[in-house]
Each structure stands twice: as structure tokens, then as C-alpha cells.
Amino acid sequence: MLSVKRQPLVVWLVAALAAGILLRGWVQAPLLVPAVTAAAAAVILPLASTRPCARVAAAACLFAALGTLLCSLALRSVREAPLAGLAATESFVSCEGQVVSDPIKETGGRSFLFRVRNISGSGGIRTDEVARVTLRGGDERSLFLGDRLSISGRARPAGEDDSYRQAMLRKGLACRLTTYPETSRLLPAQGHLLPALYGFRRRVSAAISRSMKRDEAAVLGGILLGDRSLIRPELTEDFSRSGLAHVLAVSGLHVGLMAALAIGVCRALHLGPRARSFLLLSTVAGYVALTGVHASALRSGTMIAVALLAWVIGREREILASVSLAALVMLVYDPLYAFDVGCQLSFGAVVSLAVLSPRLEPYLSALPERIRQGVSPALSVQLGLAPLLAAYFQQVSIVAPLANLVVVPVTGLALGTGMAAAILHGTLGLQAPLLFAPAALFIRYIAGAATFFAGLPLAALAAPSPDVWGACLYYLALWWILIRTTSAAFSPWPGLAGVLALTLLVVWPRLDPPAPFARERLVASFLDVGQGDAVLLRTRRECVLVDGGPAPAPLVSALAKKRVDRLDVLAITHEHADHTGGLERLARRVRVGTVLLPRHIRADGLLRRVLASLKSRGARLRRVQAGYRVGFEDGLRLDVLHPGREPVEETQSRANDNSLVLRATFGSFSLLLTGDVEVEAERRLLKRPRALDVDLLKVPHHGSSRGLGARLLRAASPSLAVISVGEGNHFGHPAPSTLRRLRRFRIRVLRTDRQGTIDVTSDGEKVYY
């Protein structure tokens, strides 16, 4: 399909460079390893065979080693930066810098990326590193992309556990700061061009907000300015399920449309080649800066510059060479771009279009030409990016080709009319509502189409994150299916047979119940969601989830791996984000029957949005207290043991001590799910000690020192205890005192930070794990 003879050398070298960077980022290795590998490859290169394949392979090895070396240096520079060192000791710092992302509203404040230029202290420390800043309180829209700030706050590591910290490190983040309005102040802008550009952006954003309804303004802000901070999570999910997420992210589609508008202006003004090139590059560079220099927009801008260079030297038809050269420029400038999701999807989409679209033509030959031209690119991108979409979004859209066919052309109209209105309002001060009226009509159509396609049955297929071997197998199958299209005597039957085989491979496991349910059994799965709680109880017919962990991606991926598309009961023990943060995407992915909440829970912020989303999709909300019982046909029973009628008030943590405590019973097997209860709640639970006698105990509050007293352990007398905890978390969970107490009672302990997801199975008598 792709041969060494057909493709320019730069394609293979850049692919090897990216592979080396990714390998070094995911595999912890000393700096000496890539250096030695690079030296070995340099020695082998001159000795390679005269055959082109051998020479290319040797050169690719050299570039892969170079990639590992560049990545090692980049990671070390982030890890050893001055602010990262202060974060490791959780020091209080004062620093100056610039807001480099649109602030996102969170519970109790806003968060944004902040490029730190100077750290105050004795003499000051000059630096250039990025931190995640959370600003508590203050006016919701008083902070904008491009603002210069002086802030003070406590610096902490970027993640609460080792795996999350490593993921943040690959994004160039080693520190997070929390500050307040009284410890932050706005600084005067520096320079002229960028402040003017960001001022124009603020005026346009304000005009859009005044001229349209909330959702329409948010979508146009995303399409036109790259500001997705105001788009509701439910609407974002609709765009994702319908395969239209790229419409909201400034990418090749948007930058290409702006370039097309610039070319149209050049032709209308009859400009010469030099003036045309200057105007085109200036327009693209200005638009990339206007939208916040996101990786996908930067890729598009770099590609346009490379394409312009290719046009000058007469090589404009070599698409893969152009995209490879653009990738080379970006990866040499910053190797960590390889880990940026937008960058991966953006480059992957272009490569998929170049490689797959021509080979799909024979399969779509029965369609009218215009429809084929619309369906083929979208289908190529979906096929090429399927493993990445599954990894990052835990779903692959089935309706994407059709949705893109009817939405992408209108996106160009929305962008064109929106930009024209923005220029007229931003430069001449003309009335905004009338100027943005045409764009509002197009945006209403786009948002309505996304919601319509997302609501169709089987709009998206839930897909667990594939491992490396699964992704390789997928691309091997895709190559085999499409390779026959390049032969002179093309026959669609081998390809169709391959498609059928792939379909059976995906669908067949979903038709057969999992092996543990060949007969009546209960499987309690303590999901590995990082520093948080999520427990899944499954029988042959019933499915119960208790809590959702700290983030949507791990929960959705874990449920997809367990093939869960329905929950009879969702129990939320309390309102803290490490138990509810993963539930934001749940309503759109999984059907939920009943939601159980503790009687005294405070549903605000994130939890309020989650409950509203679940309720709007038919879930029944129940506030429960001790004595409430849920029975299921398969013999599973849930009993609420806490809280009681009166809340626990005299406590260090009201939310924790009013957690929902559940006893699950299946035959003679029982387990106790304790939420985050602490000393006072345990004291109340001990008033009914017989109800606490169980086989399996979920250790409260991730093994904190403030829970799991000896009296509770004596009353429960479990043979097995599970601690749900994130690896290397900065809370110090589980506490050494808790582990000592469990050892003293001779209780077997399993931990999600060590064993990953833990499955405990019982047939009602025996227990297996």
C-alpha cells in the first residue's frame, strides 16, 4: 500500500522520529539508552545494504533514537524547571506570566494554563514553563486569553498520583497553582501586535455573547475563536457522538477556510505572487494566534506554509511529504507536541485522507459523485482514527460520514459570515446583533444537526481503549482490506469479506454474555480510576455502579471494557469530585434507571449538572437513608446503613461522614461499601454491629488515617479488604497506620494502585479473586 519507492524519505524518517518520541514518553528509560541507540544506528547506517529498504530502515532507526533523545531532554527540562522544583516541596510562590488558554469554569472558580516568566524571590528567577492555575472566586468573565498576571499561591505537583503526574509531564505540565482574586492582579500588556489581537478577540467574543443565545454563542466562539470554555458538556458530547467534534476545534478545516478566504481576496485585488504569499501567510499566522495557538491550528498553519513552499519549488502534489515536513518542524521545536491529542488527531486525519480516501473510491462508486466526495473524506478519517478515538473518547461515531456530509459545508458558511461580522464589528464598531444574524442561523443548524445525529440509535459504538497490539491488529486488518483496491483487476469481495470479519470481531463479544455469568454469580469490580472510588456490581441481569471516580475517561473506558451500556442503579456516596468527577459523560453513554443519593447530600456545581443530565434522560432520583433496601431478581440486595435521619454535623468533614454506606448481599456472600466515612460516622454505624459483618470490606476514604478504626474492623471481620487509591498520590493514601491495622487483623488486602482493576466473584457461597 505504501512502499519505500513511492514515498519520499522524509515520510519514513518523521514517522520514526514520532515513534521514538512516543516510545520514550510511555516507557521510563535512562537518558543513556537513547544516546547509545542513536550512536549504534549511526554506526549501522553506512554499513547498510545498498538496497533502498535497508538504507531507509537504518536511517529510520537513527531518527527513532533521535526522537527518544529529544523527548528525554524535553521531559527533563519540564521536570527540572524552577517552578516544578518548588511544586515538589509544595512551596508558596509568587510569579508573573501570561494566560495561554481560555479559562474554564469549574466548581468554585476557573482554571487555565499560565506561562510563567518570572518567579519572585531574592533577585527573582527567570523561567519559561507552563502551570495549571485554579483561580477561586472572582468575576466569571474577568479573565481572558493573553492577560498578563501576577499571582501568588501554593505550588503543588500537577497530579495526585504517579500515573496522572506522568501524563501531565508529557503535556509539559509539572505544577499546579491555586490562587484567589486578592492574591492576583492584572499587569499591563507588553508589546503592541498581540495585545491588539487579543483585544480584538475579547470584543468579538463579547459581541457574540450579546447577539446570540447561550449555546449558539458558545458554538460560534468555538468555531471562530477556538474558545470552547462556554460550551455545555452535554453539547460537546453531542458533537463527539455524531463525529463532529472537529467542527468545534480550530483545525485544518477552519485554517483552510481562512486561507481560502485570503486567496479569494488576493484574486479580487489581482495581487502578484509575493504579495499573495505574504497576505496568505499573514492571515493564517494571525488566525492561529487569534485562536490561542492550539496544536491542531499550528499544524494547519505550518502545513499551509510548507504547501506554499512546495508550490514555489513545484512539489505541491506530495501531500504526505508536506505533512511530514510540517510534523518535523513542530516535533523538533517541541517534541511534546507528539503527546497532544489535538495534534495526533489533526495529523492523523490528514494522513488518513491522503492514504485511505483514494482506496475507498471503488467501494463508494455506486454513490453519486457529490455524495461520494462528501462521504469519502469523513469515512477515511473515521477509519484511520478509530483506535485514537476509542482511546481518547471511548467511542467511535457510526453516523460521522453522514453527519459530516450535511454539516461541514455549512461550517464554512458559519465561519465566513462570522469572521466578516467580527471584522466589521471589531474594526468599524457596527451593530453586532444584525451583523451576526446570518452566522447565528448557520450555527443553529450545526448544533441542531449534532444533537439530532447524536440522538439516533447506535449513533456511536462504545469502544474500550485499545492496547498497542489491538491497534496494530486493527491497522493490519485495515491494510489487508484496502490493499486489493490498488490492483488492476479490482474485486470488492475480499474487502467486503474483511469488513464482515472485522464487524463480527467487534460485535460478536457484545452478543454473548461474559463468561462469569454462565450461571448466577456476582462480580464486584473495583475499577482502577486513579485517586477516587468506582465500584461495579454485576449479576447476569443487573448492573449497579457505586461512585464514578475523579475523571470521565477512566470510568467510561472501564465500563466499555466491561461491556456495560446500562445501569439499573447508580449510587453516589457523597459530593466530592473524586467520587463524582467521572459521571459527567455517563448520561450520554449509559442508560441509568435509578440514582441513589444520601439524604443529606449537597448537590451543587458539578454534581448538580450531573444529576440534571441524568434526570433529563429518564433517571429517577432517590434520596435515601438508613433502612432503605433495593432488591433485584438475581438475588442481589442493597441495604442502606448510613446516613440516618439526622446528619452528622460535629465532624472534620461533613460530606465524608454523611457518605452513603451500602451493604450488598448475594446468597451468603456480603460486602460493605463505605464511601469516605470517618470516625463519627463509624461510631454511628457501630450501633448496629451485626449489619456490619461481611466477607469483603471496601476500606473507607482510600485508606486514610481518619477512618477504619479497630472497632469497625472487629465488627466487620472481613477476610478480604480492597483499597481504591491512586498510585503515588500526594495524600499519602493508604496511611501506614491503616495498613498496620489490617495486618494486625490478618485481613488480605488488595489495592487498585498495585493490582489495577480488582474483580471479586462469588456464586453466593465461595469467593474468587
Image (spheres, rainbow, N blue to C red):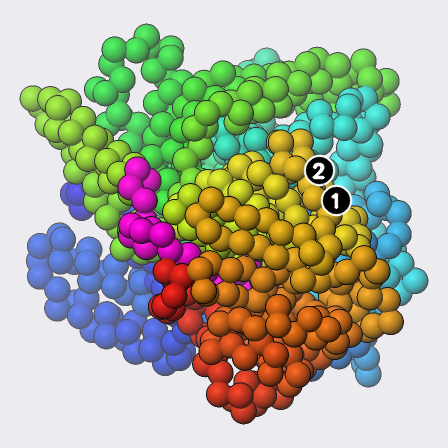
- Say if mark 1 contacts mark 2, CB within 8 Å: yes
Q: Position of residue 456 (x, y in %)?
A: 49, 23
Asked if residue 11 lies left or right of residue 254, the reply is left
For badge 1, the amino acid type reads: Arg
Residue drawn at x 44%, y 32% as measured from the top left: 460
Asked if residue 621 lies left or right of residue 39, the reply is right
Q: Position of residue 22 (x, y in %)?
A: 39, 60
Residue labelled with disc 1:
608
For badge 2, the amino acid type reads: Ala
Tell me the quarter of the image containing the C terminus.
bottom left
Residue drawn at x 52%, y 50% as measured from the top left: 544
* Residue stretch in magenta: 510-534
Residue labelled with disc 2:
612
Q: Quadrant of residue 481?
A: top left
Q: Secondary structure at mark 2?
A: helix
Q: Quadrant of residue 322?
A: top left
Tell me the quarter of the image containing the N terminus.
top left
